């Protein structure tokens, strides 16, 4: 079903779905909007489309456009002549359901009340996010994607695409991800959520129009940011160096450089993200557990039958989704005969390595996407 598309900021477009979206919990959402951006040109056969799935707090702005707008979060990988070559592919990236960057989420207006949803917004899953993405791809008239690519929570979306729509995933790339959250990952997310709901301004999620839970959100980001780095990266960047002083002050201000850095990251995050969206997206990530679904759905057998290749990439210093969790994906796919490749990249910067410039990842992605051209 086709609908009006309106132009947003920085090349962002907003598409409104026709009819309700039925969620995994049985609830329905009416009038769902999807914010997205595209780069490149869709070929006549509509066979060169690549969907990029962003990570936890990302958005649709994966790369800058032809007008030279602000750099995107994956600027080093997406663009003319880059690994995801926009001279060759039609690239799509959308903000996830439950987000706060243009797609319907808890900060959106509830059509039943005329006020922001807040925590009246239904709890969503990674699978719900993917169904909304599929509706956007339908709107663009694309039956099969050349590739679906994502890292971290974006990698979870890639796996969910394989489970729900194996025929539509011409190839898949999952970076620094997992088939299920470990107890450690759930624990970090719960501490982050508690920092938000304990903020006196949270008001049970109905803070819109008043003071936001800025302190709680800032602390939540500080907690999360620690998990994205590595001990080696933090040692090299900060060590035990003090910030703007030579001696201990013997008080509770931020004295160490690493403390100052975390405060800065937290404050910066408050300016661009919604606290409720962080609650909803982290919960969706915690609920994610796709191994049984991949088995029971027959999706892996279908991917093997269609010879749709898959690539898994992990990083040596990623302790949030360590290599053994990525290898579990590879082992499962191999057992079902899927054409799956694996690479562990040496990197000292932790989980965030997949977002940083990498000649190795560029080479791997370029070769893999070229292989998909002949699938």
Image: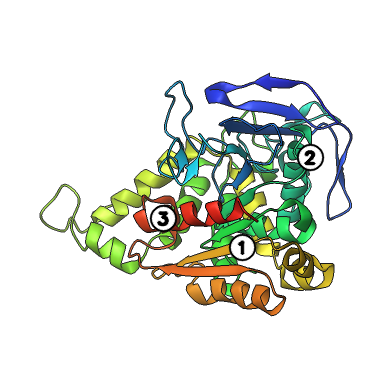
Tell me, yes or no, whether the two marked residues, 1 and 2, touch with CB atoms within 8 Å: no
Q: Residues within 10 Å of mark 1 (few under 14, many from 20)?
A: many
Q: Nearer the viewer, residue 161 or 196?
A: 161
> At which x and y percent is residue 296?
83, 72
Q: From the viewer's perspective, tell me whether residue 182 is left or right of residue 136.
A: left
Q: Residue at x 68, y 35 (%)?
A: 103
> In the current view of this chain or complex, which residue is farthest to the front?
374
Q: Residues within 10 Å of mark 3 (few under 14, many from 20)?
A: few
Work out whether residue 224 can be spotted: yes
Q: Residues within 10 Å of mark 2 (few under 14, many from 20)?
A: some
Q: Is residue 138 above or below residue 349?
A: above
> At which x and y percent is residue 260?
29, 49
Work out whether residue 195 can be spotted: no
Cα distance between the residues tagged 2 and 3: 32 Å
In terms of sequence position, does the residue under pointer 1 or pointer 2 come before the other?
2
The circle drawn on residue 363 is 3
Residue corresponding to mark 2: 135
Residue corresponding to mark 1: 310
Q: Nearer the viewer, residue 76 or 365?
A: 365
Q: From the viewer's perspective, tell me whether residue 148 is left or right of residue 347.
A: right
> At which x and y percent is residue 368?
53, 57
Report helix, strand or loop for mark 1.
strand
Q: Is residue 98 above or below residue 14?
A: below
Q: From the viewer's perspective, tell me whether residue 356 is left or right of residue 239.
A: right
The circle drawn on residue 218 is none
Q: Residue at x 60, y 50 (%)?
A: 373
Q: Quadrant of the N terminus?
A: top right
Report helix, strand or loop for mark 2.
helix
Q: Nearer the viewer, residue 201 or 112?
A: 112
Cα distance between the residues tagged 1 and 3: 16 Å
Cα distance between the residues tagged 1 and 2: 23 Å
Q: How many marks?
A: 3
């Amino acid at each position: 079903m086709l609908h009006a598309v309106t132009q947003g900021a920085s090349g962002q477009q907003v598409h409104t779905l026709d009819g309700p979206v039925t969620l995994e919990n049985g609830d329905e959402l009416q009038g769902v909007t999807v914010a997205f951006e595209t780069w490149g040109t869709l070929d006549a056969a509509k066979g060169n489309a690549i969907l990029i799935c962003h990570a936890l707090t990302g958005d649709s702005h994966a790369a800058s456009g032809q007008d030279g707008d602000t750099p995107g979060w994956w600027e080093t990988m997406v663009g003319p002549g880059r690994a995801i070559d926009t001279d060759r592919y039609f690239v799509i990236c959308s903000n996830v359901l439950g987000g706060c960057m243009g797609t319907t989420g808890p900060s959106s207006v509830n059509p039943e009340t005329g006020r922001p949803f807040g925590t009246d917004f239904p709890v969503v899953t990674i699978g719900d996010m993917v169904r909304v993405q599929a509706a956007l791809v339908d709107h663009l008239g694309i039956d099969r994607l050349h590739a679906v690519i994502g890292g971290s929570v974006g990698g979870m979306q890639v796996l969910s695409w394989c489970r729900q729509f194996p025929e539509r995933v011409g190839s898949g790339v999952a970076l620094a991800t997992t088939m299920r959250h470990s107890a450690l990952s759930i624990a970090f997310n719960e501490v982050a959520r508690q920092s938000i709901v304990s903020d006196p301004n949270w008001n049970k999620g109905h803070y819109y129009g008043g003071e936001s839970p800025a302190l709680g959100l800032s602390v939540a980001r500080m907690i999360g940011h620690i998990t994205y780095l590595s001990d080696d990266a933090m040692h090299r960047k900060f060590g035990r160096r003090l910030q703007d002083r030579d001696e201990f002050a013997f008080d509770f201000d931020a004295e160490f450089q690493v403390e100052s850095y975390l405060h800065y990251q937290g404050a910066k995050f408050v300016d661009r993200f919604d606290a409720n969206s962080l609650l909803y997206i982290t919960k969706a990530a915690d609920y994610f557990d796709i191994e049984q679904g991949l088995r029971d759905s027959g999706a892996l057998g279908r991917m093997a039958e269609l010879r749709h290749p898959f690539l898994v990439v992990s990083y040596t210093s990623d302790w949030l989704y360590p290599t053994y969790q990525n290898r579990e994906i590879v082992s499962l796919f191999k057992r079902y005969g899927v054409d799956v490749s694996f690479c562990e990249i040496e990197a000292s910067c932790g989980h965030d390595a997949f977002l940083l410039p990498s000649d190795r990842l560029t080479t791997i992605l370029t070769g893999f996407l070229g292989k998909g051209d002949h699938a």
